Every structure is written in structure tokens, then in C-alpha cells.
Image (tube, rainbow, N blue to C red):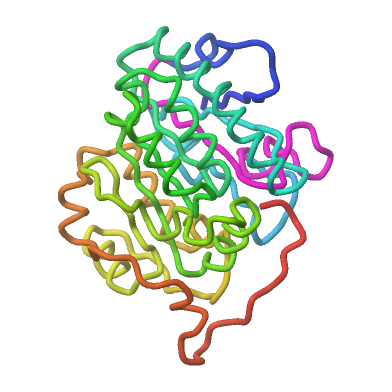
Amino acid sequence: MTLIKINASSAEIGNAAQSASTTGPVIVMIHGYKYAPDHPQACPHDLLLSVAPQRSCNRIVSWPRRLGFGRQTSEGTALAFAWHARGTLGQAYRHAGEAGLHLAREISALKAAEPTRPIHIFAHSLGARVALSALHQLQPGDVHRIILLTGAEFRDRAAAAMETPAGRTAEVINITTRENDFFDLVTERWLSPLRIWRRTLGHGLRDPRPNWLDIEIDQPESITALRGFGFPIAPVARRICHWSTYLRPGLFPFYQALLRRPEQLPFSALRAALPERQRRRWTRLLAPPRALPLPFAPKTPS
């Protein structure tokens, strides 16, 4: 297995191109808020981006393992991209934009070294801003597919990224859930307090695009449709959760297929089977009482 660790703060560019294996896709993994390289308790290389996480936590799983690295032949290269996501939410948001520039340089070097290998991105929370910011510095075809999990980025900035040359050719799967409504609201009010109608990606992109697909993963119709494709995703377990898009059982096999077998899951087939509209905000929080646990207050990195 080839796992390459990259820090956005590193002055050296092109390390990934020199170390990457020669077969299979490159999958770039980008964490979200509260992580930082070399932090004693919150280094992503020791946690989410590690093959063997060094800390046991109900929100720490190995992304490389779940995306198929270490389990198959021609598995490609896992690129663990770490950036400084600590401080206030506003500071981390600015750092995410800067990290996107570093990411673009690494991807450009990879593409120059092996132009025929597909490069995909898998990003959670503020990692979505990192991924979308990189598109402004890339060329058409540099990135094939991008999976955004509860992305902490605004719809207008995502739309601008999709208008770039790289954005017009990339396929973006935006995974949303009404479990994230509270976190979306906090992001909107903290980062854009005067623009009260400005929304994050939790409600999908405003204007439909052929290369952008919104999937509300807690919508019953979405779960039924994905089961029809062979992905038995577990039912929703909470009313409020920022991490369910990578913790809920059954989701990683779907993500792995999207990135490793994209020809088997074309946008046209997915779009035809999935619900066309996102549900309104607070649909889950205000649903009639059932067996859904109350919100919890996490203390570890996101």
C-alpha cells in the first residue's frame, strides 16, 4: 500500500509525485476542523488519515482502510493531506483557502508526472473548502471526482469554483444530511453574519449542473435508491451529527465504488434514481419523537 503524508505548511512541493505508486487512482483525503499536523492530540496523520489510528474514539475511523487501501491489488495511492484547521472557525476557514493553493500544487505535480492516472478528492467539513479552492489553480481534467461530506463552504463560492476550467470537468458528489443543519447554521452566522440568506452546501448547489450531484444521505428515498445499487446503508441514528456522513455503516462501500469504479456509477444513473430535491432545514430535528438520540456535545477534533 502507498500512503503519502503531505502537510499544507510544507515548503516542498512534488513529494507526492516522487513517491506515488504507478497503478490505480490517486485519492486525496482532506480532514475538517480542529485538526493540525504534528498536534499532540489532533494530528490527522495519527487519526482519520492513518491506516491504524493511534486513538480509539467513536468518531475516528481509518479513511485509507475504508477507501480500499491495504486490501486489494492495483489499489493506487492514498494521499493524506493535512492542514492547520485549529483556532477560531474564521481562522480555520481562511487557512482552508490557503491550503487549497498547496493542494493544487501537489495535484499539478502529480498530473505532470503521470498524466493518465485519475486523481480524486475525498473531503469532510472545511476540507470541502480546501478542495474547491484548489480548483481555481488547476487545469481541465486534473481532478476527476470529488466527494464532499457535509461541506463547510458557501454555495456561491462553490459555484465560482465550478466555473473554473478544472471545475467544469470535475464531477462533484455533494453528500448532505439534515443531521448537519445545526452546524450549517453556525457556519453561516459565524462566517457571514450580515448576509442572512447566504447558505452553505447543506442544501446543495443553487443552480443545477450536469457535473454536480447532491445526495441527501439521510433522506429515506435516497437510502432506498442506493440499496437498489447494492449499497445497504444503515438508517439514521441521530437528530444532530456532523460526522455521520463517514460514520454511518454502509456509506464507505458506496464512496469507494464512486472513486474506484466511477464507470459503474455514472451521474446519469444516480440522478435518475435519487430524489430531485433536498428537504427543508430542521426536517430531522423537528421530526416526531422516535428512537433518535438527543444531540451530543463532542470534545474531540472534527
Give the total of numbered labels. Answer: 0
Q: Is 32 inside the magenta-drawn segment? A: yes
Q: Quadrant of residue 46?
A: top right
Residue placed at 53% from the left, 9% from the top? Answer: 18
Give x and y (percent) for residue 102: 58, 21
* The residue positioned farthest toward the bottom in the image shown: 289
Q: On screen, 186 above or below 282?
A: above
Give x and y (percent) for residue 156: 42, 45
Q: Quadrant of residue 97?
A: top right
Foreground residue, 95 or 240?
95
Residue placed at 61% from the left, 45% from the top? Answer: 32
Q: On screen, 226 above or below 90?
A: below
Q: Is 59 inside the magenta-drawn segment? A: no
Foreground residue, 216 or 236?
216
Give x and y (percent) for residue 232: 34, 65
Q: Is residue 112 left or right of residue 99?
A: left
Foreground residue, 289 or 17?
289
Q: Which residues are magenta?
A: 22-51
Residue placed at 49% from the left, 16% from the top? Answer: 20
Q: On screen, 74 above or below 194?
A: above
Q: What is the chief secondary structure element of the magenta stretch?
A: loop
Q: Quadrant of residue 262?
A: top left
* The residue positioned farthest toward the front in the image shown: 194
Q: Is residue 115 left or right of residue 287?
A: left
Q: On screen, 281 above or below 184?
A: below
Residue placed at 51% from the left, 55% from the top? Answer: 246
